[in-house]
Image (cartoon, rainbow, N blue to C red):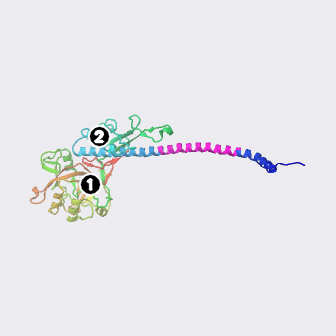
């Protein structure tokens, strides 16, 4: 009779089952090891991709900041150029002020948390910009300069490249960026748009001057007996010659140069309001057509009955302030039926006036005044103004 050890039957079964499961366990352990290695590579890849994405986003933001800085610096520098022109200086005289304005604004517009610096000799250019020749800046004649170009360079060459966050991961620790912007103002103004902002007006006086008289003023063949400086008007020469806006013969009996910009029959109250506050959007709507002219296509304005003592106080209130006047070549008709042919607009200021007493004692004395014409319409089909400028604008 055979004997069997206690538990032998079950031990044999466990041994058999154990021998069957051993390869499965080995394969399971092998699969777990492969997944771990794959996960390591996957996490590393994700980290690299994330680092690249973060640095790429940082580069894009910095590129926008560089361009923004160039735009702001160019605009500020060009306004400084205009201020120099108003002061009677040419661009070469105010070159240091222009460079200082550009550098100051550039320093306030940080790029990647750092303030850019400009080299006055290589990063700031002053010249003449013609919209018909985009991208070109003529630096040959300082008397014509109307634009400033600013280069902002955040590069390795000047040790100001943009630092990257994950240079140790991507193998690139910094990125060179640069941008340039050109701001300009122009003097070929053919007319004006309707003001779009509530309460805004056009600084146009409803009083026209003949082209012949204006050309004499620009040629300095009239008189220069008044000086305007610091808001004060005194006797003495300041280089801006004067003429009389009234009384001046216009060739139209019964009309002394007032024009209707608005209704066909502006009343004295309308003229008074326009003298003090300018031409409103309502005036432009009532005018009903574009306030635009050229030498080949003059703008026709109806004449009014003329300047009278009824607007004396309003004219006196704006003495010394910049204003725009229409310039006409011919006038036809009489009184309210007069028609003026306007070919340009110019900037002036009133210096002195007298509208009471004998006719030979009356006068409204003006001189040219460099000024910015808001809502102005730029066109290259009109003759360049002597003293009227568009607002500063970015051109490239």
Q: In the image, 139: left or right of 226? A: right
**Total numbered labels placed on residues in the image:** 2
Residue 250 is drawn in which quadrant? bottom left
Counting other residues with Cα less than 10 Å from the Cα at mark 1, is it few (<14), some (14-19), or many (20 or more)? many
Please, which residue is most extreme toward the right here? Answer: 1
The residue lying at 50 percent from left, 43 percent from top is 51
From this viewpoint, is residue 269 visible? yes
What secondary structure is found at the residue carrying circle 2? helix
Residue bearing mark 1: 342
Q: In the image, 387: left or right of 43? A: left
Q: In the image, 112: left or right of 332? A: right
What whole-number distance in Å separates the C-alpha atoms at marks 2 and 1? Answer: 39 Å
Q: Nearer the viewer, residue 177 or 50?
A: 50
Q: Position of residue 361 (x, y in %)?
A: 10, 56
> Which residues are the magenta region?
26-55
Q: Position of residue 20 (x, y in %)?
A: 77, 47
Q: Nearer the viewer, residue 113 or 369?
A: 113
For residue 269, above or below residue 388: below
**Disc 2, disc 1: CB below 8 Å?**
no
- Is residue 45 part of the magenta span, yes or no? yes
Closest to the camera, between mark 2 and mark 1, is: 2
Which secondary structure is most common in the magenta stretch?
helix
Residue bearing mark 2: 99
The residue lying at 36 percent from left, 40 percent from top is 151
Q: Position of residue 379 (x, y in %)?
A: 33, 49
């Amino acid at each position: 009779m055979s004997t069997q050890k206690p538990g032998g039957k079950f031990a044999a079964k466990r041994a058999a089952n154990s021998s069957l499961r051993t390869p499965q366990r080995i394969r399971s352990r092998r699969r777990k090891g492969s997944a771990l290695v794959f996960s390591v590579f996957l996490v590393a890849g994700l980290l690299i991709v994330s680092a690249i994405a973060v640095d790429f986003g940082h580069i894009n933001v910095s590129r926008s900041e560089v361009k923004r800085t160039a735009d702001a610096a160019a605009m500020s520098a060009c306004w400084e150029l205009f201020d120099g022109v108003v002061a009677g200086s040419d661009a070469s005289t105010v070159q240091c002020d222009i460079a200082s304005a550009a550098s100051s604004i550039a320093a306030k517009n940080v790029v990647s948390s750092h303030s850019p610096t400009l080299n006055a000799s290589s990063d700031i250019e002053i010249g003449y910009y013609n919209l018909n020749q985009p991208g070109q800046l003529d630096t040959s004649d300082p008397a014509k300069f109307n634009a400033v170009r600013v280069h902002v360079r955040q590069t390795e060459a000047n040790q100001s490249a943009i630092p990257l966050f994950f240079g140790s991961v991507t193998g690139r620790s910094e990125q060179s960026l640069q941008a340039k912007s050109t701001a300009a103002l122009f003097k070929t103004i053919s007319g004006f748009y309707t003001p779009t902002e509530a309460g805004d007006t056009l600084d146009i006086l409803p009083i026209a001057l003949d082209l012949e008289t204006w050309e004499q003023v620009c040629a300095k063949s009239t008189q220069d007996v008044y000086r305007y400086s610091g808001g004060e008007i005194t006797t003495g020469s300041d280089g801006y010659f004067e003429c009389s806006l009234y009384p001046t013969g216009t060739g139209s009996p019964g009309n002394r140069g007032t024009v209707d910009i608005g209704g066909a029959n502006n009343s004295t109250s309308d003229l008074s309001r326009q003298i003090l506050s300018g031409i409103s959007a309502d005036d432009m709507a009532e005018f009903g057509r574009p306030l635009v002219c050229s030498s080949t296509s003059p703008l026709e304005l109806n004449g009014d009955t003329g300047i009278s003592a009824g607007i004396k106080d309003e004219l006196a209130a704006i003495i010394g302030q910049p204003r725009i006047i229409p310039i006409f070549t011919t006038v036809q008709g009489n009184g309210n039926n007069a028609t003026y042919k306007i070919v340009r607009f110019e900037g002036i200021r009133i210096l002195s006036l007298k509208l009471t007493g004998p006719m030979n004692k009356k006068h409204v004395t003006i001189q040219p005044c460099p000024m910015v014409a808001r809502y102005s319409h730029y066109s290259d089909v009109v003759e360049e103004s002597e003293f009227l400028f568009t607002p500063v604008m970015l051109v490239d």
